[in-house]
C-alpha cells in the first residue's frame, strides 16, 4: 500500500515508522507519575529535593537537547540523530526497570531526558521531510493525535502497573525499541529532496520574526491549558470520588486534544481565517466554565472545549512553523516551537502560584479564572491582528 506525500508516495510501513516516533515523544515522565506518592515509602530516606529532581531534572534537560538536535539536523544525518536518541531512551528505560535507589532513578531519568530531547524535533521534522502541502498538514494532525492517544493509553497502563509493582510502569519506556526496529524502513526509503511544489517562494533562511511569533503563541496556549493538568484535581477534591473523577476528566481532556488531528484539513477549510479565533475562544470558554462551576457535567464540557481548541491549534502551528524556514532548516525551526512546549510545562505551576500569591488567594478556581481571562485577551488580539499577522491569521493557501 502506497501513501501519497505530495512529492510522490511512500510505503505504509515507512509511515508507521514515522508515526511510532510521534508516539515516543509523549512518554518522558509518565512512568514516574503514578508512583510519586509512594516514593517516600519505597525509599524511606529520600528527601523532598531528590523527589523534585526526579520530576524536574529530566524535563529541564529536554529543552537544551531539543534545540541542539534541531541545530545538528541542519548539517548532520537526521536519521542518525534519531536512532541515537532512541537508543539512549531505550537503554535508560531498561536501566530504570532495574534501579535500586533514588540516585539511580535520577541519573537514568536525566539521561533519558537527553535522548527524548534529541527525538522531539525529529518527530515532526520527519513529516516535514517526507510530506508537503495538505498531505503534510494532515500528517501533522495525525502526529498530534497519535502523541496524545499514546499519552492517554500509557497513563492508564502505568497507573495499573504501579498497583502491581512499582518498577513496572517503566515498561512504557521500552516503546522506542519499536521505533529502532522500524528505522530500517526509514533508511531504505529516503524522502524526495525536491523543491516543494506548494510553496511559490522559499525563504533563504528562517524568518525569525514569524518563528518568534509562533513560538510565543505555542508557549501561551500550552501554558493556558496546563491549568487542567496541574490544578483540576484540587478543584474536584471535595467530591466523594474526586481522584477518579479528576483522572477521567484529564483523560477526556487529552482525548479532546487528539480528535481534531484526524480531521485537521477539514477543520481548517471550514473555519478558514477564523480558525485561531475559534480555537482560542474555545480555550477561554472551556477554562471559564471550569472556573465558574464545579458540576461534573460543566467540568466535562469545559475540559472538552479546552482540549478541542488546543488540538486544532497544535498541528496548525507546526505546519506554519515549517513554512518559516527552507526545507533543510525546517526541523531546526520546529525545535524552537517544541522547546516552548516543554518550557511551559516547566514553569506553568510556578507562574500561576506566584500570581495567586500576589492576589493573596488559595482558591482552587483561581488558576482557571486567571487563564480564562488571559485566553480571552489573546482571542481579542487574534481578532484584531488576524489580517496582518502571520501568527494569528491564516493565508489562503492553507484552506483553498
Image: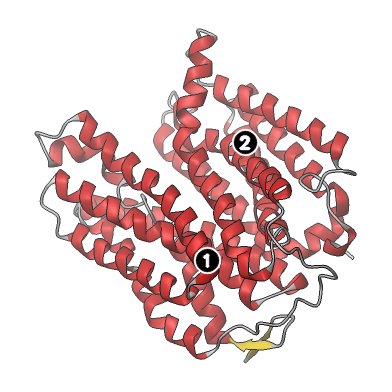
Crowding near the residue tagged with mark 2, few <14, some 14–19, many ≥20 C-alpha atoms within 10 Å: few
Q: Nearer the viewer, mark 2 or mark 1?
A: 1
Residue pictured at 43% horizontal, 81% vertical: 183
Relative to residue 194, is residue 245 drawn left or right? left
Residue 363 in sight from this viewpoint: no
Residue at mark 2: 297
Residue pictured at 27% horizontal, 52% vertical: 109
Q: Quadrant of residue 378?
A: top right
Determine the secondary structure under disc 1: helix
Task: Please identify the quadrant where the C terminus is shown.
Answer: bottom right
In this rendered view, identify the residue nearer to me: 269 or 149: 269
Residue pictured at 66% horizontal, 63% vertical: 141
Q: Does residue 198 lie above or below 335 as drawn?
A: below
Q: Position of residue 267 (x, y in %)?
A: 79, 58
Determine the secondary structure under disc 2: helix
Residue pictured at 76% horizontal, 37% vertical: 281
Task: Please identify the quadrant where the N terminus is shown.
Answer: bottom right
Separation (CA) of disc 2 from disc 1:
36 Å
Relative to residue 186, is residue 258 drawn left or right? right
Residue 391 in sight from this viewpoint: yes
Q: Does residue 287 lie above or below 30 as drawn?
A: above
In this rendered view, identify the residue nearer to me: 147 or 50: 50
Q: Earlier in the sequence, mark 2 or mark 1?
A: 1
Relative to residue 313, is residue 332 drawn left or right? left
Residue at mark 1: 123
Numbered marks: total: 2
Q: Quadrant of residue 399?
A: bottom right
Q: Position of residue 285 (x, y in %)?
A: 72, 33
Crowding near the residue tagged with mark 1, few <14, some 14–19, many ≥20 C-alpha atoms within 10 Å: many
In this rendered view, identify the residue nearer to me: 189 or 369: 189
Q: Position of residue 293 (x, y in %)?
A: 62, 24
Amino acid at each position: 500500500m502506497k501513501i501519497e506525500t505530495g512529492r510522490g508516495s511512500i510505503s505504509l510501513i515507512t509511515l508507521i515508522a514515522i508515526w511510532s516516533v510521534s508516539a515516543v515523544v509523549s512518554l518522558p515522565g509518565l512512568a514516574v507519575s503514578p508512583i510519586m506518592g509512594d516514593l517516600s515509602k519505597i525509599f524511606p530516606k529520600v528527601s523532598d529535593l531528590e523527589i523534585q529532581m526526579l520530576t524536574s531534572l529530566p524535563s529541564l534537560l529536554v529543552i537544551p537537547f531539543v534545540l541542539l538536535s534541531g541545530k545538528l539536523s541542519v548539517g548532520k544525518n537526521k536519521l542518525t540523530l534519531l536512532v541515537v536518541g532512541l537508543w539512549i531512551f531505550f537503554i535508560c528505560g531498561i536501566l530504570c526497570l532495574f534501579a535500586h535507589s533514588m540516585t539511580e532513578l535520577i541519573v537514568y531519568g536525566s539521561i533519558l531526558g537527553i535522548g527524548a530531547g534529541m527525538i522531539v524535533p525529529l518527530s515532526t521534522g520527519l513529516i516535514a521531510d517526507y510530506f508537503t502541502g495538505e498531505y503534510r498538514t494532515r500528517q501533522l494532525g495525525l502526529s498530534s493525535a497519535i502523541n496524545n492517544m499514546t499519552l492517554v493509553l500509557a497513563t492508564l497502563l502505568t497507573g495499573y502497573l504501579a498497583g502491581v509493582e512499582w518498577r513496572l510502569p517503566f515498561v512504557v519506556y521500552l516503546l522506542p525499541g519499536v521505533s529502532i526496529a522500524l528505522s530500517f524502513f526509514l533508511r531504505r526509503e529516503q524522502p524526495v529532496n525536491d523543491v516543494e511544489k506548494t510553496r511559490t517562494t522559499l525563504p533563504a533562511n528562517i524568518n525569525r520574526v514569524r518563528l518568534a511569533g509562533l513560538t510565543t503563541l505555542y508557549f501561551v496556549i500550552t501554558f493556558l491549558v496546563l491549568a487542567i493538568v496541574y490544578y483540576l484535581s484540587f478543584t474536584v477534591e471535595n467530591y466523594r470520588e474526586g481522584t477518579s473523577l479528576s483522572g477521567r476528566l484529564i483523560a477526556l481532556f487529552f482525548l479532546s486534544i487528539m480528535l481534531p488531528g484526524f480531521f485537521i484539513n477539514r477543520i481548517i477549510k471550514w473555519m478558514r481565517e477564523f480558525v485561531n479565533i475559534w480555537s482560542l475562544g474555545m480555550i477561554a470558554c472551556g477554562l471559564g466554565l471550569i472556573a465558574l462551576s464545579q458540576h461534573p457535567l460543566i467540568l466535562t464540557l469545559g475540559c472538552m472545549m479546552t482540549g478541542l481548541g488546543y488540538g486544532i491549534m497544535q498541528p496548525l502551528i507546526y505546519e506554519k512553523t515549517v513554512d518559516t524556514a527552507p526545507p533543510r532548516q525546517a526541523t531546526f525551526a520546529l525545535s524552537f516551537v517544541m522547546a516552548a512546549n516543554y518550557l511551559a510545562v516547566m514553569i506553568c505551576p510556578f507562574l500561576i502560584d506566584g500570581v495567586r500569591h500576589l492576589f493573596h488567594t488559595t482558591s482552587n478556581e483561581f488558576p482557571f479564572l486567571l487563564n480564562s481571562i488571559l485566553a480571552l485577551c489573546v482571542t481579542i488580539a487574534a481578532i484584531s491582528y488576524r489580517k496582518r499577522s502571520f501568527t494569528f491569521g491564516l493565508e489562503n493557501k492553507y484552506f483553498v
